[in-house]
Amino acid sequence: AQTVTQSQPEMSVQEAETVTLSCTYDTSESDYYLFWYKQPPSRQMILVIRQEAYKQQNATENRFSVNFQKAAKSFSLKISDSQLGDAAMYFCAYRGPYGNKLVFGAGTILRVKS
Amino acid sequence: DGGITQSPKYLFRKEGQNVTLSCEQNLNHDAMYWYRQDPGQGLRLIYYSQIVNDFQKGDIAEGYSVSREKKESFPLTVTSAQKNPTAFYLCASSIPRTVNTGELFFGEGSRLTVL
């Protein structure tokens, strides 16, 4: 079974600084999708960024970018120019080539200091 | 506005009682899911449904039941057989992967507490 590991239970960053959240996954598939979701205190899950495994180029969405290392099965999220509104729980998720199910990591709490 | 509505947001239950959590979507999505969230464990899949009148067990289905009689609705019943039902429950939906990456859209969740 596929597993997703987020080894950082909590991270802190100073406002306007850059932070990187780590994620590794285990799969024998070559075609899959990876996601980062944000869960703010309101508990509403919001998609931050997605990456298709067949694409070598790392995905970018404004201040959010990923470092996708397929051979290492690593999918880290970089948040640049951190803002107070970035404070949330961040979940890494994997979706395989068959079906629609997502497998989630345990999450990383991000705290942003002003 | 299109979205997913979960109700109630907070629910208290006595031990031995069944309780049903509602999930309604107006996104016209085919697939719907129920996840359970516990501290330190991320989200775990309880049940999912790809089409109306069909559903499959997820990783932690024991003690739960679902139905999918309408495309818009996917209620979850937490039965008395569920040993540790206190948790935060999230409902989600998606369109088929053949159309896009199949990302999930989530409701705001329901917090169930067993007294």
Image (cartoon, grey):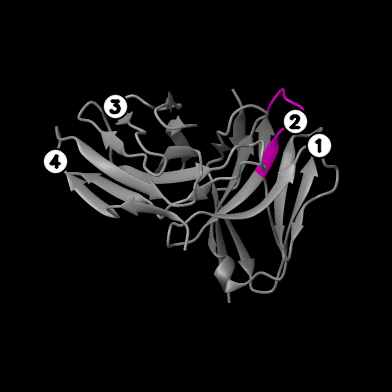
Q: Which mark is residue B75?
A: none
Residue A80 visible, this angle: yes
Q: Amino acid at mark 1?
A: Tyr
Which residue occupies 19% across, 35% down? B18
Q: Say which residue appears at 19% left-offset and 48% top-offset.
A: B12
Q: Which residues are magenta?
A: A27-34
Q: Nearer the viewer, mark 3 or mark 2?
A: 2
Q: Give the residue type at disc 2.
A: Asp
Q: Secondary structure at mark 4?
A: loop
Q: Amino acid at mark 4?
A: Lys
**Callouts 1 and 3 close, C-beta under 8 Å:** no
- Cα–Cα gap, marks 4 and 3: 15 Å
Residues beneath discs 3 and 2 located on the same chain: no
Residue A112 position, x and y percent, is 58, 68
- Answer with mark 4 or mark 3, whichever residue precedes in sequence: 4
Q: Are marks 1 and 3 on the same chain?
A: no
Residue B33 in percent (x, y) is at 45, 38
Residue closest to the far bottom: A114
Secondary structure mostly seen in magenta is loop
* C-alpha distance separating marks 2 and 1: 6 Å
Label 3, on which residue?
Answer: B63
Tell me the chain of label 2: A
Asked if disc 2 and disc 1 are in contact, CB closer than 8 Å, the reply is: yes
Q: Which residue is mark 4?
A: B14
Q: Secondary structure at mark 3?
A: loop
Residue at numbered disc 2: A31
Say which quarter of the image contains residue A85: bottom right
Could you tell me which residue is drawn at 75 percent across and 41 percent down? A52
Q: Is residue A28 above or below residue A82?
A: above
